[in-house]
Image: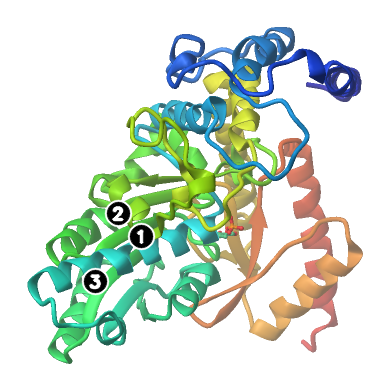
């Protein structure tokens, strides 16, 4: 959608909302459709080709409105069909697109925390089933969770909030966790009387977009009765392209998996998607059922009450955004977007490799290029400071094997090859200036 159309559609949407408010009293307060009513109204798969905006918008009245409540009171919490079924169906569509099954929604940090808390409650349940005398607090004190030394800070934070020790597993020369490294730590901790119960793998680390070896790690976690969560916050969107799907091999061993559609799938912030293998594990850990939250369908098995899957009770209607994006771009449009950005990153990588003064610091797999000037960390810190202070482009650094590294990330929808070329010209101009200032 170009900006002219965006202006037009935005104004039409304001009119739609104003009309809705003016005529709200003509609508039923409570929906009279049954769970499952959506199944016959929306397709099971992401459409391959893009659809017309007019057709998508028409479906708000046809598909969405019959299943929502129409009132102004913020003090009512209850099941209503669209809020419970629509996210599940959109999630199923997305699962189909990336070749996986069944999802819920939140943020990546929240998903990691939820999975850790669910794993904690599962291990306590298992241990107490055999040893009813062991108390929860005694078990908690011995629990150990693990993640890559490259994991996002939200993983360490999940350990802090969950009150369990989170140990960092060393990565190999590609910044990836291998089975042997985790195995050694788990065996050592078991010998010390601790209880390993959780491993958070990363597919697409923040620093360098590295991928943990989940084909090795998954069976190991399964055998050790440890929960494996996969944080694919950034890279997960790429799995809609069949050529990147092998990076997801091993997901079948995971207990939970999460990625952020808002990072790279053209959905506005926030829209993160979480899949859990055994929904009972997560619901069992957090279920609360006061009278004011009860509804007629809760035991029917026909609806998913996402309030049991998350900390907040209320939820935003994130699946609606996803629905619009799926239909306006189509699967093919979304795949084109990912592929184009990966190609742009590869173009940038080529430019870096062609300049002998620079080095590439990690394999370029998706849209991130880690690079630096050959030379000291101070030199690279100065270069980045100069780049960012001119405010033409902005880059965030990382540390890889003790080296200060610059990260060129292609992720904006509007990025074209000429932007990448201009960025490289800008970087090399500043680098040349800097290198000339050095004593010869
Ligand atoms: N995990 C990884 C690998 C990330 O790169 C990020 C954010 O950049 C996060 C988790 C945190 O995501 P969120 O903001 O959705 O909590």
Circle nearer the N terminus (3, 2):
3
Asked whether 286 or 237 is in front, the reply is 286
**Residue underneath mark 1:** 285
Q: Identify whether 94 is placed above or below 401.
A: above
Of all residues, the one furthest to the left in this rendering is 130
Q: Which mark is residue 281?
A: 2
Binning the other alpha carbons within 10 Å of mark 2 as few (below 14), some (14 to 19) or many (20 upward) gives some
The answer to whether 417 appears left or right of 140 in the picture is right
**Element at label 1:** helix
> Which numbered disc flags the more N-terminal residue, 1 or 3?
3
In this view, 74 is above or below 21:
below
According to the picture, the residue beneath numbered tag 3 turns out to be 124
Locate residue 12, reporting x and y percent: 88, 17
Quadrant location, the C terminus: bottom right
Q: Indicate left or right for 5 with 362 as reference.
A: right
Out of 369 and 19, give the one closest to the viewer. Answer: 19
Residue positioned 16% across, 72% down in the render:
127
| Residue drawn 35% across the image and 32% down it | 99
Mark 1 and mark 3 residues within 8 Å of each other at the beta carbon: no
> Helix or strand or loop: what does disc 3 sit on?
helix
Marks 1/3: CA–CA distance: 11 Å
């Amino acid at each position: 959608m170009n900006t002219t159309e965006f202006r037009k559609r935005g104004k039409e949407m304001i009119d739609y909302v104003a009309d809705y408010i003016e005529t709200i009293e003509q609508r039923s307060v409570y929906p009279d459709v049954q769970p499952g009513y959506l199944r016959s109204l929306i397709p099971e798969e992401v459409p391959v080709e893009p659809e017309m905006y007019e057709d998508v918008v028409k479906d708000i009245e046809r598909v969405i409105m019959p299943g929502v409540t129409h009132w102004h009171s913020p003090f009512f919490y209850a099941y209503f069909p669209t809020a419970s079924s629509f996210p599940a169906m959109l999630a199923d569509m997305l699962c189909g697109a990336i070749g996986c099954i069944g999802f819920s929604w939140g943020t990546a940090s929240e998903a990691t925390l939820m999975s850790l808390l669910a794993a904690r409650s599962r291990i306590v349940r298992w241990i107490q089933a055999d040893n009813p005398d062991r108390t929860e607090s005694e078990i908690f004190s011995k629990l150990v969770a693990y993640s890559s030394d490259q994991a996002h800070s939200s993983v360490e934070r999940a350990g802090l909030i969950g009150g369990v020790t989170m140990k960092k597993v060393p990565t190999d020369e590609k910044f990836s966790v291998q089975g042997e490294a985790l195995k050694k730590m788990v065996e050592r901790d078991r010998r010390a009387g601790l209880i390993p119960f959780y491993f958070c793998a990363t597919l697409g680390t923040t620093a360098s977009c590295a991928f943990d070896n989940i084909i090795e790690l998954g069976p190991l976690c399964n055998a050790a009765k440890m929960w494996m969560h996969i944080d694919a916050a950034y890279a997960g969107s790429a799995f809609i392209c069949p050529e990147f799907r092998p990076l997801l091999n091993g997901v079948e061993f995971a207990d939970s998996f999460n990625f952020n559609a808002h990072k790279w799938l053209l959905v506005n912030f926030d829209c993160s998607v979480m899949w859990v293998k055994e929904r009972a594990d997560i619901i069992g850990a957090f279920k609360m059922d006061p009278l004011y939250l009860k509804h007629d369908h809760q035991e029917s098995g026909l609806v998913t009450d996402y309030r049991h899957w998350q900390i907040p009770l209320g939820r935003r209607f994130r699946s609606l955004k996803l629905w619009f994006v799926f239909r306006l771009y189509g699967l093919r449009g979304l795949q084109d977007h990912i592929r184009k950005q990966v190609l742009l990153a590869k173009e940038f990588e080529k430019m870096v490799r062609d300049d002998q003064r620079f080095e590439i610091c990690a394999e370029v797999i998706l849209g991130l290029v880690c690079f630096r000037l050959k030379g000291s960390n101070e030199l690279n810190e100065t270069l980045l400071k100069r780049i960012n202070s001119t405010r033409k482009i902005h880059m965030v650094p990382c540390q890889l094997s003790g080296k200060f590294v610059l990260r060129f990330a292609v992720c904006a929808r509007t990025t074209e090859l000429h932007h990448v070329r201009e960025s490289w010209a800008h970087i090399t101009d500043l680098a040349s200036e800097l290198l000339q200032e050095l004593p010869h």
